[in-house]
Amino acid sequence: MSLSALELKELKQLVLYWVYHTVGSAQVTAVSLFDIYPKRVENGAAVLEIVAVVKSFRPKMLSYVKLLNGRNVIIFVVDQWIFERDIDRGFLGEAIASKLVFPYQSFQGERYLYVQEIILKKRLILESIENLSIGYPELIYHMQIKPQFFLYEIVLKRLRIFPLLDYEISNILEGYTLTDDERKLDSYKDALQQLEAVRIVTHINGYYVVSKEFVLQSQKRRIWFTNLIKSAPRALFTSMFGLFPKILNITLQNAQTFFKTQKFNMSFLQTDLNANSPTFDPQKYIFVPTSNGFVSLADKVNSAIFAKKMFPNKEPENMTIKAIGGVLNDIYLLSAQVDNAECKIVIKRFKDWSGFKWFPLTLWSFGARAFAVSGKARLAKECATSEFLRTRGFNVPKILYVSNPERLVFMEFIDGEDLSHLIKRLDAEPQRAKTSSELVHIETVGKLFAKLHQYGMTLGDTKPENVMINKDGVIYLLDFEQATQDGDKTWDIAEFLYYAGHYLQPFSNNGIAETITEAFLKGYLQNGGDLKIVKKAKSPKYTRVFSVFTMPPILLAITDTIAKTKHLPIS
């Protein structure tokens, strides 16, 4: 606390005397001093806040500005029922409850206040988790979160949205130094422990992992909550109007007092906290997996920094970076000599799709497929799906490092050729198509698609060029930025087959298209793929989308082959 022990004792006596004198015979449940300047008070000029919780208090809320022992003090007196509703459901928009987010000194009812603080922080932690599930719906399952994330996320959110605290940002943040984290984290750890008891989070070596069940439930609750708001009782709506003048009066009194007693610096309001105060960036405490360990979601790296992280005790030589493709994303190849061996790494920058670049995609897939547009969302899908597939035995390029702020993913370079080249070779030599090794690879890809569909995963971008065969004949799946759980499995099949037809010559023998389709469906169905999902691929919903890329005779040959597929193909 900023007050000396003697000042605090004298202030406590004056406050309690004044509170009991004001409420008369009503029962005082708790009285607390909120220290919103945890690091310093300049010449005793800072305004102190007192909240008194009183059982069955009439009127429901009162506020006073008093001069006690030479200090300006704002005293809020609030009915216990109102206070607890603001704690557990934000009844007053957390106008009073938010104060328990910041440091406080109990003058009376210490245990009561701590219980309410835990109830509040449990609710706010759940809201933070739900916000993560909205922003990172796939990646959240792989996140490991330190409790500091919740501390800074909740504090900064209150500072941004609560006008009474907005101009105090500088002073408040100065008190939230990392060296004092442990003391401030105690209540968050207690709240997280209670959430762990009901299996919402799991504690692993100082980190917290969110349960899949809670994420799924929270998505359902958002729909439920929307419906609830629409049918909210008029009584509650009317009561809020009755309380609003009192809340507004409190706001005006506070603002006038603060402006008179503090040096107001408009630059505080214009400060980008995340940009200029990296210590307080909440995402610094969220970690996502890579093949080289966990990486902070707030970590900023470029190619030079990445090279130092990858080779901390070595100096890469002849390092070059060149563009190797990408229309909707920027893709580069980093090459360097390390210990006389060549090292190659793919760097992928996820750009936001907007304006003209996004418009053709919308027209192309209208009614058949929705695409993730933002770079942030697509990067999260790439990382989450890669980890999902890797841990289930699929061959995918290793993700070496991630920089979420820069929208960069550094990944393993796979030396080989993509499946489009194999399809073109089949087209060039139709006489050996039935016995070619290329056809075996296509059948294997069908098996891989069936396997990932059984896990509920859909890739969303299954062009044959996103399948890579390395020099040892091992098949790798690439490009997961459109992947989703429980997505359109038929789209995966349709895009692969119709895009495979795109690689065939316009006047090619249609038998090649039939052979490729039969091989893929053979692998898909023999490995447990659903025939009903396959049949849907001949629907106009899908064929019209790919008619832009594939010649009509080839498209027809593929749909006819799909239509004739009635059972598991016989070898």
Image (spheres, rainbow, N blue to C red):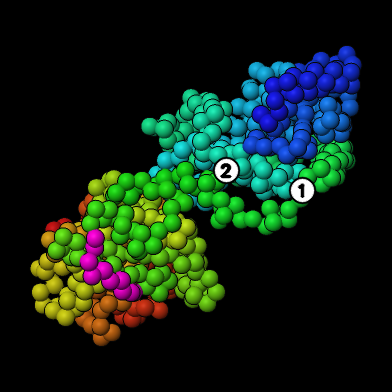
Q: Name the residue tied to disc 2.
A: 153
Residue positioned 77% across, 28% down in the render: 51
Residue 502 position (above or below residue 535): below
Is residue 484 visible in the rendered image? The answer is yes
Q: Amino acid at mark 1?
A: Lys
Residue positioned 43% across, 56% down in the render: 300
Badge 1: how crowded within 10 Å, few (<14), some, or many (20+)? Answer: few
Location of the N terminus (image quadrant): top right
What secondary structure is marked by label 1? loop
Viewer-nearest residue: 500 or 211: 211
Q: Amino acid at mark 2?
A: Glu
Is residue 423 visible in the rendered image? The answer is no
The image position of residue 63, as x and y in percent, is 86, 32
Label the magenta part by its dominant secondary structure: strand
The image position of residue 315, as x and y in percent, is 24, 60
Residue positioned 12% across, 66% down in the render: 437
Image side of residue 177 versus residue 443, left or right: right
In the image as oriented, which residue stretches furthest toward the bottom? 507
Residue positioned 21% across, 81% down in the render: 509
Question: Which segment did they paint magenta?
Answer: 315-325
The image position of residue 135, as x and y in percent, is 52, 51
Q: Find the distance from the CA under tag 2 to the CA under tag 1.
A: 27 Å
- Mark sitting earlier along the chain (2/1): 2
* Residue 263 - label: 1
